Image (cartoon, coloured by chain):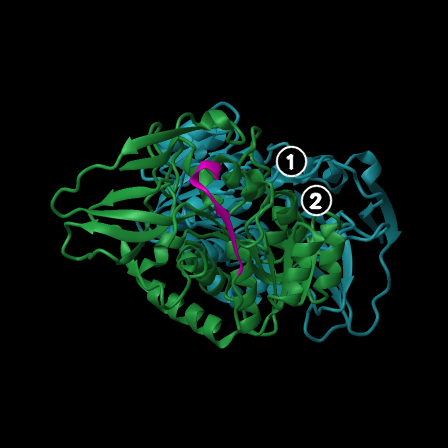
Chain colours: A cyan, B green
Amino acid sequence: MKNKQWLLAKRPFGEPTSDTWQFAEADVPELKDGELLVKINYVSLDPAMRGWLNDAKSYIEPVQIGAVMRAGTVGKVVASKNEKFAEGDYVCGHQGVQEYAVSDGKMLHKVDPKLAPLSYYLGVLGMPGMTGYFGLLKTGEPKAGETVVVSGAAGAVGGLVGQIARIKGCRVVGIAGGAEKCQFLIDELGFDAAIDYKSQNVKKALKEACPKGVDVFFDNVGGDILDDVLTQINMKARIVICGAISQYNNTTPVKGPSNYLSLLVNRAKMEGIVVFDNIAEYPTAMKDIAGWIHSGEMKVKDHVVEGIETFPDTLMMLFKGENFGKLVLKVGDE
Amino acid sequence: MKNKQWLLAKRPFGEPTSDTWQFAEADVPELKDGELLVKINYVSLDPAMRGWLNDAKSYIEPVQIGAVMRAGTVGKVVASKNEKFAEGDYVCGHQGVQEYAVSDGKMLHKVDPKLAPLSYYLGVLGMPGMTGYFGLLKTGEPKAGETVVVSGAAGAVGGLVGQIARIKGCRVVGIAGGAEKCQFLIDELGFDAAIDYKSQNVKKALKEACPKGVDVFFDNVGGDILDDVLTQINMKARIVICGAISQYNNTTPVKGPSNYLSLLVNRAKMEGIVVFDNIAEYPTAMKDIAGWIHSGEMKVKDHVVEGIETFPDTLMMLFKGENFGKLVLKVGDE
């Protein structure tokens, strides 16, 4: 049996290019005692993956040159010599951009395909969902009646953050690229307003969309958008730094927020989050999110692209703003 | 009786220049019922004054063109038609850069020259003291054994912050300009280490001076120093944004912290403070600080320049890093 894989060939300077990746076909190894074999159905594509390519101290080890690219995955156990997993189980983990993966089971957890579509375990019920849930509620601390702004609002994390803020009784304003995404935020996800950063002056649009100012900003984008929001924050505002997708492929230094002294004027704070800090509380979040989905209060939009061969181009959709909802790569049938 | 005053003539673009100010001599007005006349002894010169010159939304109204320049003051009541103040009382307030000031008494509070030298009421027992005390303790939240770094460490706020951190059992590292100031921080104020940003590579020096990383950074300076410290912060670090003196006279946009994504990696926060939020608790702070001074745990260094005529040049000492300790302008004898 052959396994198709994408390996990291070379660390990118700026945008990942064809040089960054190496496609490989390898034999699927024989299982040893305690191991299991997973046939992967979906590979998660997330902005954070760009950071994992850099050889720099971060919240997680960089991917090593020659290694299979790290990625969240969901798949089916097709063979097992591990007593905790049986053939036919579905499992979630970080098994990388490949069709098959061998594991000792330690970093895998079982998921139930009857409770939710498999891809949801990479999105609303996976890392992006946990990121948005804890980042908004524990660090953003939104109160009913406050105004919450989220950037990258049509992405996996942003769409969830806005909906949770709405459910908690906040006025919700999303920033996204393009009229179609903005319409979707209002019509489908129930945002109160949406700003198209590609066609609107964000600062002016924020003033109109947030007549009472901004209490919580959940930032996935950084750059000029962060600076624009900083001009509109209220006293004691909370800015959650979840990511800065506009800066990840920079070949020049990251653009720091020129307007950060607005934090001083407004006694506001800017705080960074990493999802893994909340592992012990994931079950609570999953229960809440699943409940909102079942009650119809929360909508889910996945953006599925088929074929492991497309990985390098599909990943780039994130940085070009071409994904519409949670981006996943379908690499095998369920 | 003539009153010498400095008025704001023109809002500066970048550094204040001779065009910014107008020297005036005016008659001291007759007192109405309820008013009192103060002969000012010391005028406080603080970096925040630069911000008050800008016609921009901030935590306080800008100084108006043609008005006496706003400044903290301490002086003696020389005439009173206000029953709450008697001739001979000493009072503190924001009476501006002038020799005499008339007041209705509402924004003045009495101080006791027997308890501390008058100038202290503009420094450790005044706005800079309150800023450092509450900014460090309430926002920085230092714990014994942690490493606290402070920029502008030989200034009014920085020197106090470092000493309070030392008293609270922290390792204290100061960043200041020049060997003399750095020696003073260690020899006189009891800092554990000092970094001379003018002659040292701050990032390298921080690595040496903070072998366990930085838990709290109290920033008065901004710019490159903030960026350098961001590379050395620990998990859950607290960055207190008190000021950014390196940026106040910029004619280009403020340099935002390029390394702000270190907040994300380290789940750290950056939070702005304004001293006035703590007015109700000033007495507690003053009691603590006065206690430390009396016990010898805290040293005070004032930098006194004489003569109201020198105001424009003396103010600029702050932005050139020429003050050594709390800068005050002596405008009248006690």
Residue A32 occupies quadrant:
bottom right
Q: Is the C-beta separation of discs 2 and 1 under 8 Å?
A: yes
Q: Which residues are magenta?
A: B301-310
Q: Residue A319 or A271: which is nearer the viewer?
A: A271
Coordinates of residue A220 in the picture (x, y in percent): 55, 43
Q: Chain of mark 1?
A: A
Coordinates of residue A119 in the picture (x, y in percent): 59, 50
Q: Chain of mark 2?
A: A
What is the number of the mark on residue A319? 1
Q: Amino acid at mark 2?
A: Arg
Q: Amino acid at mark 1?
A: Phe
Q: Residue at x 74, y 56 (%)?
A: B205
Count residues near mark 1 (Cα–Cα under 10 Å), then give few for <14, some for 14-19, many for 20+. some
Q: Is residue B268 magenta?
A: no
Residue B184 falls left or right of residue A19: left
- Residue at which label 2 appears: A50
Residue B144, can we see it?
A: yes
